[in-house]
Amino acid sequence: MTRRRTALYAALAATDALLAATGRDRQRRLTKPLLMPTLLQGRDRPTQIALACAGAGDVALLGGADAAFTAGLGSFLVGHVAWVVALRGRGSSGLLRQHPVLAAPYLAAWGGLNAYLWKRTGRDRIPVVVYSCALLATALAALDTGEPLRAAGGALFLTSDTLLALERFGDVHLPAHEGIVMATYTAGQALLAG
């Protein structure tokens, strides 16, 4: 990505996170849809697909209805599959094969979150578990590249969606919650894209 495009993405991401943190949802209809299209320029095809799906999910999640959430979840699910393909396409470092214990914090976080949300997700239980498996696969594929920045991107994406799930299903609300979600999400996507 060129420096100009990197600066544009960083400015958009910071602006959107600030708008999200301060509850300015109306203004976010301008910033949020621009994030992933800005980031996907000049990427390989699997990365472009992953980012395009994320962009579609971002737009869907601007709606407040359950149907919007379902559409967003579906878009991000396909995006995670594309991320795993993209990250595997860069090659495995063999890190997780050599040191499987590195996956333990990810697996513990995944298990703990799903156990906590199990009774709270109701009819969304199975879709949430399926989605969380795809999210975990993305984070582990990023870790397995052996590239610290991509691994950080996978961890940030996992953090972002964990916070989102805790808010939606677990009634956990941090100060400036949506701003934190967007800051970790946009940073995670940028680091995954490289």
Image (cartoon, grey):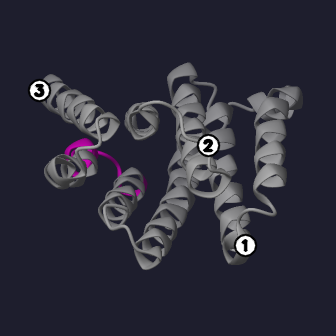
Figure quadrant of residue 87: top right
Is residue 161 toward the left or the right of residue 63 in the image? right
Is 40 magenta? The answer is yes
* Residue 110 at x, y percent in the picture: 77, 45
Distance Cα–Cα, label 3 vs label 2: 37 Å
The structure residue drawn at horizontal position 38% and vertical position 35%, both measured from the top left corner, is 179
The structure residue drawn at horizontal position 65% and vertical position 32%, both measured from the top left corner, is 143
Residue 178 to residue 176: above or below: below
Residue nearest the viewer, comparing 158 with 82: 158
In the image, the segment drawn in magenta is: 37-46
Q: Earlier in the sequence, mark 2 or mark 1?
A: 1
Is 9 magenta? The answer is no
Q: Earlier in the sequence, mark 3 or mark 2?
A: 3
Mark 2 residue crowding within 10 angstroms, few (<14) / some (14–19) / many (20+): few
The mark lying in front, picked from 1 and 3, is 1
The mark lying in front, picked from 3 and 2, is 2
What is the three-letter code of the residue carrying label 2? Val
The structure residue drawn at horizontal position 34% and vertical position 34%, both measured from the top left corner, is 21
| Residue on which disc 2 sits | 172
What label does residue 122 carry, if any? 1
> Which quarter of the rendering shows the N terminus?
top left
Is residue 75 toward the left or the right of residue 4 in the image? right
What is the three-letter code of the residue carrying label 3? Arg
| Residue on which disc 3 sits | 4
Distance Cα–Cα, label 2 vs label 1: 17 Å
The structure residue drawn at horizontal position 32% and vertical position 67%, both measured from the top left corner, is 63
Q: Secondary structure at mark 3?
A: helix
Q: Are marks 3 and 2 in contact (CB under 8 Å)?
A: no
Q: Secondary structure at mark 2?
A: loop
What is the three-letter code of the residue carrying label 1? Gly
